[in-house]
Amino acid sequence: MPARALGMWGAEISDLLADSDPAVRVCAALGPAPVKRPHALAVLLDALRDPGTTDSWFPRPLAGLDGRFRFTVLRSALALAESFEEVAPVVIGIVAADDARIIDCERGPILFRAFPDGYDPTRPLTSAQRDLLQAFVAADESSGAISGNALWFRAVGLPRARDRIKALL
């Protein structure tokens, strides 16, 4: 994808954020060349609203990217966001979609972005953190979403039992 290569080479590609092809827009938003942050983040979040379609843009992985394309898009969106609240509605949707097979590449990074300094029981949860934990609790009913993410919950200092998470809400 030329937009991705141009960005990797440091070319100014901000104009590609308005391209008619969504794959070109996303590749431009991935950077690492300087791009218009709010517009780039909006492009990335739009792609994450339909991760299956985003993955389908490239039948073979792009050079230098590991795993599904949406994993790169998610990592970039989480890094580009100035706060978890900026990405919360979309990434909570990823957790709510209940694909428990994608723990380390999606749910773990989402938890780390939501709790960048770890969970502190002396500080109240933000509404975005509360909504995220509620999505985990809801997904847990059908898939064991919390138990499947126990290592990530422990890594950010959250309890690993569904009932203890519910008690925080």
Image (tube, rainbow, N blue to C red):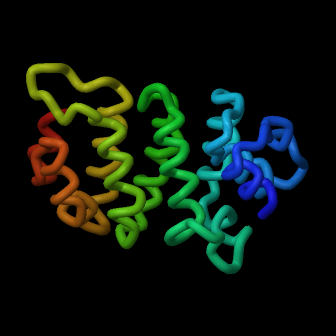
Residue lying farthest to the bottom in this orientation: 60
In the foreground, 77 or 98:
77
**What residue do we see at 41% from left, 53% from top?**
95
**What residue do we see at 23% from left, 66% from top?**
148
Query: Which quarter of the figure is the C terminus placed in?
Result: top left
Q: How many numbered marks, from 0 up? A: 0
> Compared with residue 50, is residue 163 higher up or lower down, i.e. above or below?
above
In the foreground, 3 or 160:
3
Residue 51 visible to the viewer: yes
Residue lying farthest to the top in this orientation: 123
> Toward which corner of the image does residue 129 lie, by quadrant?
top left
> Compared with residue 123, is residue 105 higher up or lower down, i.e. above or below?
below
Q: Image check: 118 left or right of 108?
A: left
Query: Which quarter of the figure is the N terminus placed in?
Result: bottom right
> Toward which corner of the image does residue 32 lie, by quadrant?
top right
In the foreground, 132 or 70:
70
> Compared with residue 23, is residue 117 higher up or lower down, i.e. above or below?
above
Q: Image check: 54 left or right of 126?
A: right
Residue 89 is situated, as x and y percent measured from the top left of the image, at 50, 37
Residue lying farthest to the front in this orientation: 9
> Compared with residue 62, is residue 4 higher up or lower down, i.e. above or below?
above
**What residue do we see at 54% from left, 46% from top?**
76
Q: Image check: 105 left or right of 8?
A: left
**What residue do we see at 69% from left, 71% from top?**
56
Residue 26 is situated, as x and y percent measured from the top left of the image, at 71, 50
Q: Image check: 73 left or right of 134?
A: right
